[in-house]
Image: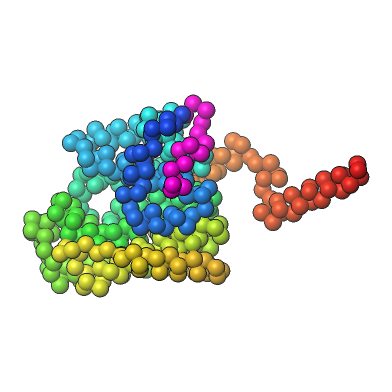
Amino acid sequence: MDATDNFFDSVELPDNVLIGAGDRAACMAAIRNGSRTFHAASLLLPERVRLPALALYAFCRLADDAIDESGDPRRALADLHDRLDRAYAGEPVAIAADRAIASTLLEFEIPREIPMALLEGFAWDSERRRYATLADVHAYSVRVAGTVGVMMALLMGARSSDALARAADLGVAMQLSNIARDVGEDARAGRLYLPLNWLQEAGIDHQQFLAAPSFTPQLGSVVARLLESANEIYARAAFGISALPLGCRPAIHAARLMYAEIGHEVSRRSGDSVSSRAVVPPARKAMLLARALSASAWPSASRRLPVLPEALFLIEAVERADQHRASVNPLPPSATKSLEEQMLSIIDLFEKLERRGRETT
């Protein structure tokens, strides 16, 4: 039995949220079938993070599908906004993913602006929006993937601006890899995420390309530029891994390596992701998982880098939420102790209890 099979039994929800025994199937199907790369990387997460992370993924996957499969995307989006409101109110819709995400959002104090931005990205998809520049592609990627990166960091307990900025970087880089991999598939569905100004510079009429998607060396050069940008952002993201709890680092190393490998596979095909879809072989994934475990055994470098401008609003949302929480419910002095101080206090307490036990015997 997969550990995630027990998730909906073990997750702690508000008193008024109940999960029925028959609610798991849809969420588990979304997790297992939606992204093999995500599932592989998630296996390295500690259970305390892995389970809410799977809940987060299940909600994102099912929400995306709700819009893609709807005959009326606007109505589906409005329904998702209502579902999100109910989740934050602790009264989720009677759907497994909604019940699980309600617990996750509330327990980890995820500001509403972050999943709202995710839904905005889904809305842009439903509009078949085009992106004039790389900055516009970044803005889209922040919404559909940077938001997930930030929420994952919050699940891990990383709330510093630097850590969240690097988490957003990783989400954006992953999305750029996905865009590079799916150029042909997206075009055949009437979607285009490559910067229009890059296509124009390469002599490609984007409307003609969408009408009859085909690979050319010129298109390959555009895909190569996108992958170069992704690699630069992957490098930025790597500096944030040391800000995460030690037990969480292998999974994030693995996610970074495996998604970057998607781009490397596209590059090996000279940027041709129209004729076929690049897939990372299982053996290669296994090797990258092993490399992630090895990399996590050594201290990670850290560097203070600026926030990706398009992601700044996510970091500011967390800062505002934390400032509000601190003003409404300031932590007692003991809660501000460092982990080392807390551990010393616990050890001291046990020593006192042990001495007291000896005195009474």
**Horizontal side, residue 136 vs residue 314: left or right:** left
Work out whether 272 lies above or below 9.
below
Which color scheme is applied?
rainbow
Q: Most extreme residue toward the top, as rendered? A: 16
**Horizontal side, residue 322 vs residue 89: left or right:** right
Residue at left offset 23%, top offset 67%: 223
Work out whether 45 lies above or below 5.
below
Place of residue 160 in the rendered image (x, y in percent of width and height, measured from the top left): 53, 54
Residue at left offset 25%, top offset 62%: 181
Place of residue 301 in the rendered image (x, y in percent of width and height, measured from the top left): 52, 69
Q: Most extreme residue toward the front, as rendered? A: 1
**Horizontal side, residue 225 vs residue 217: left or right:** right
Is-magenta flag for residue 142? no
Quarter where residue 178 is shown: bottom left
Quadrant containing the C terminus in the rendered view? top right
Work out whether 139 lies above or below 222.
above
**Horizontal side, residue 337 vs residue 118: left or right:** right
Place of residue 341 in the rendered image (x, y in percent of width and height, measured from the top left): 72, 54
How many dots with numbers? 0
- Residue 260 visible within the image: no
Place of residue 243 in the rendered image (x, y in percent of width and height, measured from the top left): 54, 60
Residue at left offset 42%, top offset 30%: 20
Residue at left offset 41%, top offset 44%: 56
Residue 308 or 266: which is nearer the viewer? 266
Stretch in magenta: 1-17
Is-magenta flag for residue 3? yes
- Residue 217 visible within the image: yes
